[in-house]
Image (spheres, rainbow, N blue to C red):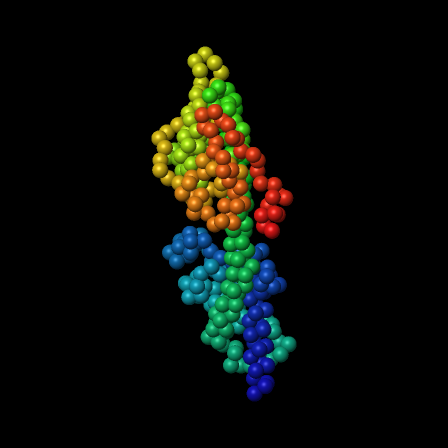
Amino acid sequence: MQSDIEEHKYFLTCIRLHALHLLKITDYKYLNTIKCSLTEEEVEAYELDTPGCLRVTPTNFILDCACAKDTPYNHKAFTVFAEDFLDKINNHGWYSLQTIPEQYCNFDIIYGAFKAHFSYIKSRYNDFIVAPSKNLVKAREGMKARLQKSSHTAWKVQLLKLHLDAMAEHTSLQKHLPLVKHLGTQGISSDESEDEVRRMINYPHVYPRWRSQKLAMLMWEVDLVIVEFLSVAIGKHKRAGTQLQNCPHSDKFNDAAAAPPGLPVNCYDATWLSSLHPHSKKLLRVQEKEYNFDTGENEPTGMLTLEDLQQHLG
């Protein structure tokens, strides 16, 4: 009984060695160095017996690991394997280190053994080719997302500078420069959807939920000034930089937009403010005094410092 088990193990070892021989590799971890799958066009050409289609032979032994074992092509590959294995042990004395029992030396047994072994080859194909390619796709997608985020952040900084430059040239808005500087990109990043190629603001706007109506009206006024600021005057050179298009507003809001801390209370939406957890509201450091949107008085006192944050977190 033990002898039968050892003989069967040796037979299966020979099946594996012969597969590696025909594939011209020393281990299945090197499957990624050979052709071991067919394209849809190659499969179709083979099944239609198109002249010049791929032919599997002992010297050009290719498995289609991307497809099931019962495809016409893989059936032919298993047949070629079984015929070549028989030829090598019967006519060339291969695998004679031990005697392969007579019951294993027939086409059907060899064909079935290699067909079963093909499942293992496919598992190695998935490990060394399919899985790494999926990880590569994920890595590329992650890199693309990071690059897009970086580009988007740079665009938001540019857009903030554009707001400040336009306000500096507009007498009625100069008094609000400290407020908009304090808002930073958080004050404008959620309400404008940018086209990264044409650098245009595409409306309808999506506004940050935290922003009060009065603050929103101020920012809308700034938007209009920017359009004027960037307009091309007749007989003058076009101003370099972003070109914006002003379109109707909407009632859409971004609930996830982060609010800048340290603003006067009337810069925040009252309903949104009342919905905050007490701890979150404390960290926001809302100024109880109101900002005067007519004169620009009672400007923000500053962002939350690390010392303040540590004190709040206790």
Relative to the observer, which residue lies in front, 28 or 294?
Answer: 294
Relative to the observer, which residue lies in front, 218 or 25?
Answer: 218
In the rendered image, the residue lying farthest to the front is: 289
Q: Measuring 39% from the left and 27% from the top, which residue is drawn there?
A: 246
Residue 104 position within the rendered picture, expressed as x and y whole percent measured from the top left:
52, 78
Q: Measuring 37% from the left and 56% from the top, which residue is drawn there?
A: 48
Residue 147 position within the rendered picture, expressed as x and y whole percent measured from the top left:
54, 41
In the rendered image, the residue lying farthest to the top is: 235
Residue 241 in view here = no
Residue 256 in view here = yes
Quadrant in which the N terminus is drawn: bottom right
Relative to the observer, which residue lies in front, 152 or 268?
Answer: 268
Relative to the observer, which residue lies in front, 180 or 99?
Answer: 180
In the rendered picture of this protein, how many numbered marks are placed on residues? 0
Residue 153 position within the rendered picture, expressed as x and y whole percent measured from the top left:
53, 37
Q: Measuring 44% from the left and 61% from the top, which residue is drawn there?
A: 67
Residue 177 position within the rendered picture, expressed as x and y whole percent measured from the top left:
52, 27
Quick check: 147 above or below 221? below
Q: Measuring 58% from the left and 40% from the top, which residue is drawn there?
A: 304
